[in-house]
Every structure is written in C-alpha cells, then in structure tokens.
Amino acid sequence: MVKLEKDNSNGGSRWKGPRLGVSGFSLYVPKLRVPLEGWCQWYGSPWSKVQATVGHSFRVPGPQENVYTMAANAVLRLILKHDVNPRSIGYLALGTESSTDNAAGAIIVKGLVDLALVELGLPRLARQIEVPEIKHACLGGVYALKAALRYLACDGAGRKAIVVSSDIAEYARGSSGEPTQGAGAVAQLLEEDPALYTVDLAHCGSAAAYRGMDFRKPHLRHLDAEPVDGAIRRPDYPIFNGRYSTICYTDEALHATARMVYRLGVQPRELYNRLEGAFLHRPFARLPVNVMAALYIWGLTRNDEHLRELEAICRRAKADFAKMQEEAASSPDLFVGALGGRINEEAYPEAMKVVKWFRESPKFTEVAEHKMRLGTAKMMDIGNLYTASLPAWIAAGLEDGLEKGEELAEKTFFTLGYGSGDAAEAMLIDIVPGWQSAAGKIGFSQALAGAVDLRQNEYEALHEGLPEPSPNLVPNHELVVDRVGQCTAKGDGFQDKGIEYYRYIPAIAP
C-alpha cells in the first residue's frame, strides 16, 4: 500500500504520493457526419437555436463500426503515437453504456488491438492484464480512470494503464435528443510521472442518488422494435425525461463539487480563483455552461464574506435573497418529487432564477465562461459521446492551449464527470511542465478531418438500420466488423449467433 504524506503547500491541504496521471490522448470518431444546419433544414428546426444550444454537427457510425471497433482504433492510435510497449500495459479498462455484449467487455477491445498489432509486426498486449468494463451511464469512463489510477498506485506500480471511453449516442428520430447524437472513442494513457497532468485522486468529490426514470436503457424497451425487411432492429434509444435529467445533472454536480471542496479544506472562492479552467461532462454545448453558473452561485452561499455579492445578484435577478439561500442549503429528493408528479418542476426555483440571470450577465463571461474557453470551439463538431465527452473536451482543451501558445504548466483545472441515474465525480488535475510535447500528439483536429457529410436519405437509412443507401467508405488503417455469426447450432454444438468477427484493414499506400 502506498503511504501518503500530508502537504500543506500550494494553497490548501494536498497529499504527497506517487505522481499519477495522464500522459496521452487519442481520439477516434466515425467519418460519417451530420451537419446540424442541414439537419435543421431537413426537419424544419431553428438553426440559430440548435447551434447555440447543441453545436455544429454530430457523427454516425458506419455499417462496419461499433463501440468495440471505435475503442480499439483509439487504443491502437494511442499505442502507436506514444511508442508504448504493449507488454508494459497491465490494465485496459472500457467505459461505455453502449456495449452490445452482456458477458464480455474490454477483452473484446484487447482482442481487436492484438489483431492489429500482429498485422503490424508488433507484440500483443500482455497476457498478464486486467480487462474490466465499467458502466454507469456517462460516468463509466471516469470510474474507469479512478480504478486505473488506484491500480497504478497499488499492485500495478511500475506498469502502464489505458482507459478507453467509447459510446454511440442514439435517439429516436423526432425526439428532443435527436440533434444531440454522436459517436466516438477517447483513449487515455495513464502512468507514474505523467507527461500531461496529474490527478488529485485524494481529494475527488463523489455523489450519487437514485433517480428512477431519469435516463435509462432497460432491455424491455427492445420489445417496441419494429421489423425492418424481415429483421428486427434493436435500437439503443434511451428512455429519458429531458427536463428532469438536466435538473438531476445540476443537482449532483453541486453535491460532488461541495464534497471535493470540503475534502480540500478550502473556501469555494479560494479554489475558484486558483483554477485556470474547467472541463465538464458535455451532452450538449449549453448544459455545462448552465452548471458552471450554478456552481459559482452556490459557492457564494458558502462564505459570509461573499453574501453581499450574492445579495446584489439576487436583487438584479428579482429573486428573494433569503429563500435563495434556504434552497441552496437544502438537499431535495428529486426522485420522490418525480414520483409525486413533479418531474418537470425545478428543485431550486428561486436559486435557479438567480443562476439564469447570472448566466446571461457580463459578470459570468468575466469570471466563469472564460474558464471554459479551451477546446470549446473544437467540441462544437463532436456531438454527444456519452462516456467519452469529458475526456474529449480535456483533450481538445489541451490541444487548443498548445495551438494558442498558452503556458499551462503547473496550472490547475476543475473536471466534472456525470452519469445519469445518477452520480457525479469532481476532481482536480494539474498540468505538468513540458506538457506541450504530449499535447502535440493528441491529434484532435486531425481525427475530425476527412468527414463525409450524409444526405438526408443516407442518414435516415443508417439510423433505421437499412442496408441502402449507404455511403461508400474505404477503411484505412483501422479495425472493422467483418461479419456477424448466424449459427445457432450444429452437429458438434457450435454456436456463434450475434457474435461479431473483426479484421484489421492496413493503411492505404499514398
């Protein structure tokens, strides 16, 4: 067991121990893209509103892509970019909520990566490796990250770990979630003395509460699937209640962040002023902005010295100052309220009136929105990646900082992961000196290049699982689904119905 020693330097109680964190990122997204401006024209939605709330575009997986191919392609790119010895990896975790096998998890990703490594003349991943799949809606990747760091701090000391988050966000056509779709995977390389940033694992803030019908994927929903050309498509459309879900996200973010601040032993404003920036789970562009505004307002209620500022904001927002404070100190049971028919009612009506006013004020741009500047523009073209949304934004932010020439060494960033249902994790990351070299290998913009824009009929066919019409994609240096087993039984008892078989497509010579 690693012994941690207390260290009171750097403004607040921190802990000395092994320097653990992230040394590299790799992103994989499908080539097929739906520009949201075109989507709005197809279905008569207001482009200005969709652009401001959601973003510019989202990706759609092709017929030969799934969660496992995307994850494996991201991991393969990570290994090759950082010249990682595959034998040095002792932990490979998959965070996802879109997996299609209820028995096997990250071992499928390992199998695909090994297939490609052999084709490339490289050694396979180590046989002595842990391969868990971790699921909790969009938070699975963050839980996998924490588990990997604990592995490195304990029995995996001296080895490396890879955490890959891979998901397909798919919603029924015509639903409010349709423009927030997306697909992709982000792989992270973790080790001691990391090249990008360390993670303050000792002071993470955790929160969880059961929310019932917030956002779920019960297997019984597949009974609603309709036959298509004699086959039954089993879409991964979630059961969700959008208004309720946004309330749940904000509520759990507040609780997780409050726990982190308590564990740090600092005042919210003291910590806030020290932060260089923030990265939050991002199902669509507007939501993390709203949550950031709420975190700032709630922070003002935690210190008597800042109540005068809060009272002035309440006055401008035409909100009751005393009632707002009372709500901010409360902890309502949202699920009980939902069961009582109040599923779309705001849990903190007076406080959120203040948040809404503050979010639109020049003060918010000055003190809060600026902290989310890095990577924001790049993320407008990524869509919702569920478990991969947060690491994607961090990767985009670091690449953006490098391109803008910002010096981020020894700067602290706040990160917030969230998973519906629901749970949240707040943690701090500290950028290390020399981070630029590893940031230069991220390749976020490169991964988005070469997109193929879908026509309306192509998008609809892919969405409904129809074979035609489909764009002619030529795989290049990537793993794909080769075929799906159909055998239910043979004389020797062999079965493989529904099992995917894969192959690696070598790079096309220029």
Image: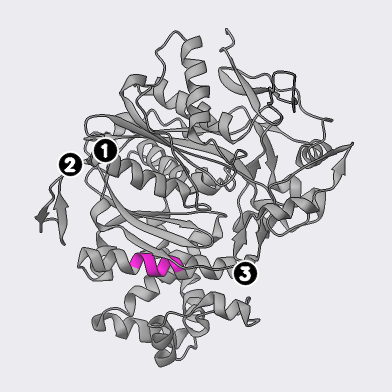
Look at the image and tell me whether residue 406 can be seen. no
Q: CA distance from mark 1 to mark 2?
A: 9 Å
Numbered mark located on residue 152 in the image: 1
Task: Check residue 253 for magenta coloring.
Answer: yes
Please give the residue where the numbered disc 2 appears in the rendered image. 18
Task: Check residue 226 for magenta coloring.
Answer: no
Count neighbours of disc 1 (C-alpha within 10 A) and say few if under 14, some if 14 to 19, many if 20 or more. many
Count neighbours of disc 2 (C-alpha within 10 A) and say few if under 14, some if 14 to 19, many if 20 or more. some
Q: CA distance from mark 2 to mark 3?
A: 42 Å
What is the secondary structure assignment of the residue under circle 2?
A: loop
Look at the image and tell me whether residue 42 can be seen. yes
Q: CA distance from mark 1 to mark 3?
A: 39 Å
Disc 2 or 3, which lies upstream in sequence? 2
Disc 1 or 3, which lies upstream in sequence? 1
Query: From what the image shows, is residue 333 above or below residue 232?
Result: below
Query: From what the image shows, is residue 487 above or below residue 378?
Result: above
Q: How is the image coloured?
A: one colour
User: Residue 220 placed where, x, y %?
Assistant: 71, 55
Numbered mark located on residue 36 in the image: none
Q: Residue at x 34, y 33 (%)?
A: 161
Q: Which range is magenta?
A: 252-257
Numbered mark located on residue 243 in the image: 3
What is the secondary structure assignment of the residue under circle 1?
A: helix
Contact flag, marks 1 and 2 (Cβ < 8 Å): yes
User: Residue 48 placed where, x, y %?
Assistant: 67, 57
Within the image, what quadrant is residue 29 found in? top right
Within the image, what quadrant is residue 409 found in? top left
User: Residue 253 placed where, x, y %?
Assistant: 43, 65
Q: Amino acid at mark 1?
A: Leu
Disc 1 or 2, which lies upstream in sequence? 2
